[in-house]
């Protein structure tokens, strides 16, 4: 549905007296506009003249207060679909975020209230829905609460409701808003130190080695990994700036992009806290340097065909990796090395868990993971760069503990690639 947004811009109004209408009672509201036009709205169906006059007085009060509902016959389904397209689609940074909002609306609100008018929903309805969805899934309930708060504020702004019916309504106590981000980790779905070492060694000669390192040793998200560039590396201070991810841009069509690039566009990160500077462990730093040699060699050999986008995780032609490129290689590594059949995302959980088990400050862990809030109980405070710097001295010994020794390294045969790389390339 498309709302005629000009209806909100009335400059004067008039409320007619109550009169009999089709055997009952009602009244008319005349909205007057700058161009001299008028839009009448009829309020009818009241059983008694007294009820109609009470409603008329309420309408006059709302007109004076600026809270008069212009769109009184709009259904919940019509409004929420309008809100998604006209507000959320233009505000969020990625298609994934939009899809999350849309999923909550489609699967958890419209089936309950879709056919009802926006003006008919009351706060009791909201409480009931929150309770039911909490029993279904606390995580869904939290997302639902966010959607309700944002959409109902928009409804007030657009004169669809006179009040934000979700304001001040909390979820049931068992999922009450927490002052921190809770990470529930099943230790049966993470790797121990020995298993990490096996995975790192086994992945060394696969196309996903760098992806594995960025995941399990630095805690980057899948789409963040694919978006990392050599220009994000501070080669002097040995830090990595996480500032983009690859995904699908909102408000775009597949046909607008080259083949196989629709879901590999550079988009904003998940949250402001996702933008972070991370210390690069020595082992990962050396791997980046080696990967850069391969990158330069491929660029030199395939000058006309090479796509020089600067991605660390890319094909031999410089092309960015798709979001699921790692999957068949990863599953094969797990099977062939008798490792637990865990999800790719569980490697990130492994990183987080091992840091916590090794007495890392939870605030520092939160920053390293790019969480918006604390993982444990501490509130986020202080500067991001300061927190990261505080744990640099701690993270390296931890990494050293799980990586091959120099003796083990010497037993591994590697190809020496002689490539001259200008020093300026490393001074970022």
Image (cartoon, rainbow, N blue to C red):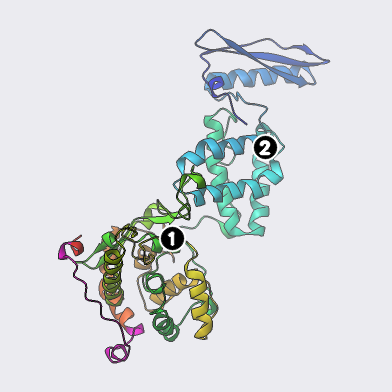
First in sequence: mark 1 vs mark 2 = 2
Q: At 38% from the left edge and 52% from the top edge, which residue is drawn?
A: 272
Q: Residues within 10 Å of mark 1 (few under 14, many from 20)?
A: many
Task: Tell me, yes or no, whether the highlighted magenta stretch contains residue 62.
Answer: no
Q: At 67% from the left edge and 37% from the top edge, which residue is drawn?
A: 121
Q: Which residue is mark 1?
A: 223
Q: Among all residues in the image, which is located at the extreme left?
A: 423
- Looking at the image, residue 249 lies above or below residue 376: above
Is 140 or 66 nearer to us in this picture? 140
Question: What's the magenta region?
Answer: 401-424
Residue 63 image offset from top left, x and y in percent: 56, 19
Q: Is residue 22 visible?
A: yes
Of badges 1 and 2, nearer the viewer stands 1
Q: Which residue is mark 2?
A: 121
Q: Is residue 216 visible?
A: no
Image quadrant of residue 239?
Answer: bottom left
State yes or no: discs 1 and 2 in contact (Cβ < 8 Å). no
Image quadrant of residue 205?
Answer: bottom left
Left or right of 304, for residue 422:
left
Q: Residues within 10 Å of mark 2 (few under 14, many from 20)?
A: some
Q: CA distance from mark 1 to mark 2?
A: 39 Å
């Amino acid at each position: 549905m498309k709302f005629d947004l000009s209806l909100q811009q009335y400059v004067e109004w008039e409320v007619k007296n109550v009169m009999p209408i089709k055997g009952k009672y009602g009244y008319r509201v005349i909205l007057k506009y700058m161009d001299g036009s008028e839009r009448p709205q009829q309020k009818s169906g009241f059983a008694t003249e007294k009820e109609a006059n009470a409603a008329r007085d309420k309408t006059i009060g709302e007109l004076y207060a600026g809270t008069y509902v212009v769109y009184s016959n709009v259904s919940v389904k019509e409004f929420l679909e309008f809100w998604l397209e006209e507000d959320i689609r233009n505000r969020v940074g990625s298609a994934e975020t939009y899809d999350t909002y849309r999923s909550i609306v489609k699967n958890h609100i419209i089936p309950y209230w879709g056919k009802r008018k926006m003006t008919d929903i009351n706060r009791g309805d909201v409480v009931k829905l929150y309770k039911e969805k909490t029993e279904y899934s606390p995580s869904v309930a939290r997302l639902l609460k966010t959607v309700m708060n944002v959409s109902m504020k928009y409804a007030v702004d657009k004169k669809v409701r006179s009040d934000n019916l979700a304001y001040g309504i909390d979820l049931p106590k068992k999922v009450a808003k927490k002052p921190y981000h809770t990470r529930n980790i099943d230790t049966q779905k993470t790797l121990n130190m020995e298993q990490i070492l096996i995975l790192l060694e086994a992945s060394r000669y696969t196309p996903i080695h760098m992806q594995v390192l960025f995941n399990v040793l630095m805690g980057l998200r899948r789409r963040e990994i694919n978006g990392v560039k050599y220009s994000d590396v501070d080669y002097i201070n040995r830090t990595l700036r996480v500032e983009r991810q690859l995904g699908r841009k909102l408000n775009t069509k597949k046909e607008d992009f080259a083949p196989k690039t629709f879901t590999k566009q550079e988009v904003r990160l998940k949250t402001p806290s996702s933008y972070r500077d991370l210390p690069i462990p020595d082992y990962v730093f050396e791997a980046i340097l080696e990967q850069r040699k391969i990158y330069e060699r491929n660029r030199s050999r395939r000058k006309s065909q090479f796509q020089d986008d600067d991605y660390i995780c890319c094909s031999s032609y410089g092309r960015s990796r798709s979001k699921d490129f790692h999957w068949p290689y990863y599953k094969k590594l797990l099977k062939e090395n008798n490792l637990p059949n865990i999800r790719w995302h569980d490697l990130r959980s492994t990183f987080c868990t091992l840091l916590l088990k090794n007495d890392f400050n939870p605030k520092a862990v939160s920053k390293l993971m790019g969480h918006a809030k604390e993982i444990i109980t501490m509130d986020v405070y202080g500067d991001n760069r300061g927190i990261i710097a505080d744990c640099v001295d701690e993270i390296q010994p931890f990494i050293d503990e799980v990586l091959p020794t120099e003796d083990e390294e010497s037993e591994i045969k590697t190809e020496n690639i002689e490539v001259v790389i200008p020093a300026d390339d490393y001074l970022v």
